[in-house]
């Protein structure tokens, strides 16, 4: 398959090898991209490509991997373990610390939270410049789930736990360690942290601590409070599948 660059002017964007374009999309490295090409899982402008050496023009040629369009740009995906009293705004007139202060050196391009956590809510916050993926992860049709650990001001009554489990927005709720008490885990669809707090406060259970411990399959393992890390290629690929 020939590249379409022969008819382009000298001012047109430079063509790049297809395996590099795929790698720059963040789904795999170049060697793995070559394997995907040979398996016939990559299409350029609607045609399956199975040979090496093909070149494409970023911004012009359309590259699809297993039916999903790639953009040829290496996006940034940063996972932050947000501390308490940290806000999700770019700046704060009161001078309080923001999540952008914590991830200031994480990416050369501007990144933004996929969703927001309230100032008093702790836990996982994903920031990226991949706008399309961010929208898919929290869109109405998304299957993205999140898990919260709550510490309540008093022990949660077993009847109230059952009542909460029957709410349509709640996927699962249980006592931590399966022992009745004030520590509760609740699993909901993504973007429901405000609703989670509201559910318990409406039932007169003050929320002393609300901590998002899982988001879209990502966890806080080996990520201390207030620290961040880049996602691995496997994690990014998993997120792309989750956001379909």
Image: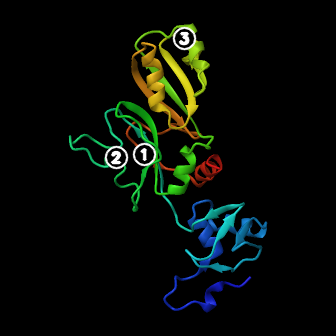
Residue at 72 percent across and 72 percent down: it is 46
Q: Picture quarter containing residue 206?
A: top left
Which residue lies at the image location 57% right of the left edge and 8% below the top edge? 159
Q: Earlier in the sequence, mark 1 or mark 3?
A: 3
Q: Which residue is mark 2?
A: 102
Closer mark to the observer between disc 3 and disc 2: 3
Q: Residue 50 or 144: which is nearer the viewer?
A: 144
- Proximity of marks 1 and 2: CB atoms separated by less than 8 Å: yes
Measure how far apart labels 3 and 2 are at the Cα level: 38 Å
From the viewer's perspective, tell me whether residue 140 is left or right of residue 227.
right
Front label number (1 vs 3): 3
Q: On the image, numbered disc 1 is attached to which residue?
A: 228
- The percent coordinates of residue 111 (x first, y second) are 41, 55
Which type of secondary structure does the marked residue at label 3 adopt? helix
Horizontally, residue 48 falls left or right of residue 15, namely right
Count residues near mark 3 (Cα–Cα under 10 Å), then give few for <14, some for 14-19, many for 20+: few
Q: Is residue 18 left or right of residue 100?
A: right
Q: Are circles 1 and 3 on residues that touch, CB within 8 Å?
A: no
* Left or right of residue 233, residue 202 in this image: left
Percent x, y of residue 76: 48, 57
The correct choice, above or below, for 115 with respect to 155 in the image is below
Labels 3 & 2 near each other (Cβ < 8 A) = no
Above or below 207: residue 21: below
Residue in the foreground of this view, choosing between 19 and 200: 200
Q: Quadrant of residue 205?
A: top left
Q: Earlier in the sequence, mark 3 or mark 2?
A: 2
Q: How many numbered dots are placed on residues in this image?
A: 3
Percent from the top left, x then y, of residue 197?
A: 44, 25
Looking at the rendered structure, the secondary structure element under dot 2 is helix
Label 1, label 3: how far apart the Cα atoms are: 36 Å
| Residue occupied by mark 3 | 160
């Amino acid at each position: 398959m020939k590249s379409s660059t022969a008819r382009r002017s000298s001012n047109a964007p430079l063509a790049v090898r297809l395996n590099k374009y795929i790698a720059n999309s963040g789904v795999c490295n170049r060697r793995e991209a070559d394997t995907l090409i040979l398996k016939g899982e990559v299409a350029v402008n609607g045609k399956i490509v199975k040979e090496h050496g093909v070149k494409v023009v970023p911004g012009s040629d359309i590259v699809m991997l297993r039916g999903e369009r790639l953009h040829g740009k290496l996006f940034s995906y940063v996972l932050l373990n947000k501390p308490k009293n940290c806000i999700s705004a770019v700046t704060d007139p009161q001078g309080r610390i923001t999540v952008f202060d914590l991830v200031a050196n994480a990416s050369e391009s501007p990144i933004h939270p996929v969703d927001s956590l309230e100032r008093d809510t702790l836990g996982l916050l994903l920031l990226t410049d991949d706008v399309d993926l961010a929208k898919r992860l929290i869109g109405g049709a998304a299957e993205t789930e999140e898990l919260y650990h709550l510490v309540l001001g008093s022990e949660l009554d077993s009847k109230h736990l059952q009542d909460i489990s029957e709410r349509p927005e709640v996927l699962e709720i249980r006592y931590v360690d399966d022992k009745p008490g004030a520590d509760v885990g609740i699993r909901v669809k993504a973007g429901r942290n405000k609703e989670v707090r509201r559910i318990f406060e409406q039932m007169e259970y003050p929320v002393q601590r609300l901590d998002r411990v899982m988001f879209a399959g990502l966890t806080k393992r080996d990520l201390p409070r207030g620290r961040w890390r880049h996602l691995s290629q496997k994690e990014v690929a998993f997120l792309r599948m989750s956001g379909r």
